Amino acid sequence: MALADDLALALDPAQLMAMGGTPADPWQADVLRSDAKRQLLLCSRQSGKSTVTAAMALHTAIYQSPALILLLSPSLRQSGELFRKVAVLYGQHEGAAPSDASTLLRLELRNGSRIISLPGTEATIRGYSGVGLLIIDEAARVPDDLYRSVRPMLAVSGGRLVALSTPFGKRGWFHQEWTDGGPGWQRTLVKATDCPRISAAFLEEEKRALGDLWYRAEYLCEFTENDSALFSYDDVMRSLDAGILPLFGGV
């Protein structure tokens, strides 16, 4: 790789996508250039959220070495899909950092960095520490206890946490962090209507096929209610009163 290209990549992570032939959308460039330690990406299906986090993982491995990057997904199949995007992007920029080892779920670079893709089970991830970047894919479907068990991996390293997902109802840690997680998170919302690669005609077809509830969740990124629930989430939250002591076990 030419020195000028390497310098451009080092200074601007968005160049990693541009030089690979898929220029970043404005929101993707903002995500890649951000120095926020905590990011939530609430994005439509097929909007490019996996692609941008794959670029983030690879840039961190190349230019912040030696770095440990973990890609966490609810299932092994999903982990493999996210890692495949990393591998494709790395194949376009291999000259920036040669590898020592590569498998279907792991990439080790000669500079000491590692990118490891893991399914979302507590037993597979508890042994890791000193994580420089933790990416949680399909975060709305990752259980709360698993989320709580991975956060301490960043305690000593001061590493970054990036969670990306479409909504999965008004429940779980991802919904909580998005709606009430405080200013510590940088939040990025990308609806299908914001993506230039998704046509209005396709979205109309999806709305007819999926119905309003699923369409609003999958493409408009709304935390919709479960249509079989007896009470809505908002009604339940409005019924709570912190000033009332519990009937049993209260002090």
Image: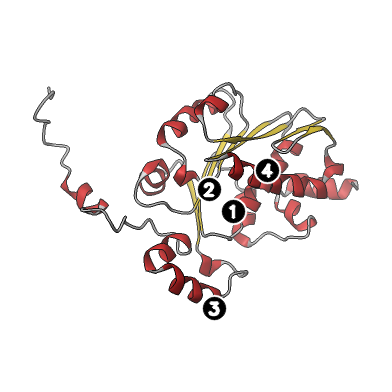
Query: Where residue 63 sits: x, y (%)?
Result: 75, 38
Q: Which residue is mark 1?
A: 49
Above or below, comparing residue 214 to residue 90 in the picture:
below
Q: Of callouts 2 and 4, which one flags the residue occurring earlier in the amino acid sequence?
A: 4
Using the image, determine if residue 131 lies above or below residue 196. Answer: above
Instruction: Tell whether label 1 touches label 2 (CB within 8 Å).
Output: yes
Location of mark 4 (residue): 83
Q: Residue 248 location in percent, x, y?
A: 10, 26
Gap in Å between the C-alphas at discs 2 and 1? 7 Å
Instruction: Report the Cα–Cα distance between label 2 and label 4.
Output: 14 Å
Numbered tag placed on residue 36 in the rendering: none
Cα distance in 3D space between marks 4 and 3: 31 Å
- Say which residue label 3 marks: 201
Query: How far apart in space, not on screen, are marks 3 and 1 (Cα)?
Result: 22 Å
Q: Earlier in the sequence, mark 3 or mark 1?
A: 1
Residue at 53%, 25% in the rendered image: 123
What numbered label is drawn on residue 164?
2
Name the amino acid type tagged 2. Leu
Going from the N terminus, do you reach mark 4 or mark 3 first? 4
